[in-house]
Image (cartoon, rainbow, N blue to C red):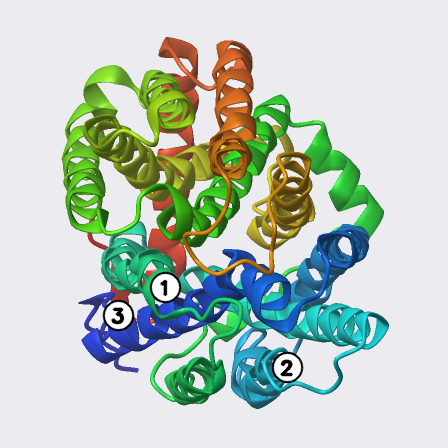
Amino acid sequence: MTQSATPLLVEEKVPLKSRIWISAADSAAAILQTVIGGGALTYYFLRVMGLTWDWISLGWLLFGIWNAVNDPLFGYISDRTKSKIGRRKPYIRYGAPFFVLSFIAFWIPITTTQLGMFLQFTIALFLYDILYTAIATSIYIMPYEMAVSNKARSSIFIWKILFMIFPNILPFIIAFIQPGPGDDPTGFRTILIAMAVVMGIIIAVSTFFYEEKHFQQEEQQPPFLTAFKESLKNKAFIIFLVVSFTVIYIQTSLMQGVAYYFDEVMRDNGLPIYIGLAVGIVAGIFLWVKMRDRWGVKRCLMVWLGIFAAGCLILLSLGAVLPAAVLGFLFVGVGFSGGMYLIPIMNGDVIDNDEDRTGLRREGMYAGINSFVTKPAISLAQSAFLWILSMFGYQADLAKGAQPALAQTGILVAWTAIPAALLLISLLAMNWYPLAGPAWDKVKAALGKIHQEKEKKYLEAHGIKYVE
């Protein structure tokens, strides 16, 4: 009997169209979330619709309670979903139209009563977040479903970073087109609704251009409570959650405050400030990429937290002075770039540490628990910002540029004081972060060998050449 020939093995590659489309879908979901969580929604209901700050704060706080259940539960369900098109794609493809409708529900005026607007705001927020969680979590995990080798996954992440430019610049665009009290909001609403439809189409259509590795549907996962409790035994993960909470709170607060800042504090001086921010982001990316291996992740994180805190403190104390504001935004830009680059690396180390402890990789559960912490940060940032504004006498019904001096000071305090404090707390917490030094390097090296053997075995069993 003639022995069959060994099949030809080829290197695993993710097609270019797949990398582009999953990154575009990620950016599209982030664009809509930037509008909702970044402050434009709160500004619209407060300044345009006339809903009082206490009603809005209550809506955000109720929403934060809901998120205590919503995100970890969906991560658990998603890990166990089985379908012909995979575990994640059904939520992305079929959830997109309803996601768009839930977004549109915010902007169509239904009533002018305080209770009616509060109900519209809160119910739409709940519906929107259910669908956002299902779609965004699935997109976030998708690179791990699309590819097995680290080399192939990295090719996806590069495109995702490029596409994230669009949601990051959106708050500054909205700050210029958002209507104020007495302005006609029709054009603004039309722009947002049209944008939502386009983003929804991108999200849904993207699912026809990438594939999941279906073998992962057969993997056995521990029960929900067991997985949840085991994750919280990971000391590095607890510190990561402190930093992650800080980052999401700051992103929400800074994006929310942009419109108020340029309305009242720094009118007609946006260009040099935007240049300072852009320079900071670009310089930061080069800094962190170059110094990651030289300093190590822990040291990079501590330097990043210090620079970010300095930027917030400069804006808090001298945000009304243009040269200082430019410097503050430059430091904030370095901070934003560090959040985009360093946090995913820290997250990967935390999950690697969990695998070293338990022998399992549970990205979905970790993503769900992280959202369990970060989503309330969005609610708290929205509520705290409005509460501080009210303490400084901010009057929501005044035209742009008409706030008294005390309210302008309140904008700076609401915008940067709590973020600066959280950054300093995170910097202190990083002193106890254990994933650094020779011992951790040995763990990473051992895990790397284990991953190589697993990848090689699976890839070659499916006719794919393993390439280190």
User: Is there CB contact under 8 Å for labels 1 and 3?
Assistant: yes
Which is nearer the eye, 319 or 99? 319
Asked which secondary structure carries label 1, the reply is loop
In this picture, residue 402 sits left or right of residue 17: right
**How many neighbours does mark 2 have within 10 angstroms: few (below 14), some (14-19), or many (20 or more)?**
many
Q: Which residue is identified by label 3?
A: 14
Q: What is the crowding at mark 1: few (fewer than 14 residues within 10 Å), some, or many (at least 20)?
A: many
Q: Would residue 148 be visible to someone looking at this image?
A: no
Q: Position of residue 136 (x, y in %)?
A: 53, 66
Measured as percent of width and height from the top left, residue 416 is found at: 48, 31
Is label 2 or label 1 in front?
A: 2
Quadrant of residue 60 in the image?
bottom right
Asked whether residue 361 appears in the rendered view, the answer is yes
Residue at left offset 47%, top offset 38%: 408
Nearest the camera: 139 or 164?
164
Amino acid type, residue under disc 1 in the picture: Ala
Q: Which residue is disc 2 drawn over?
A: 102
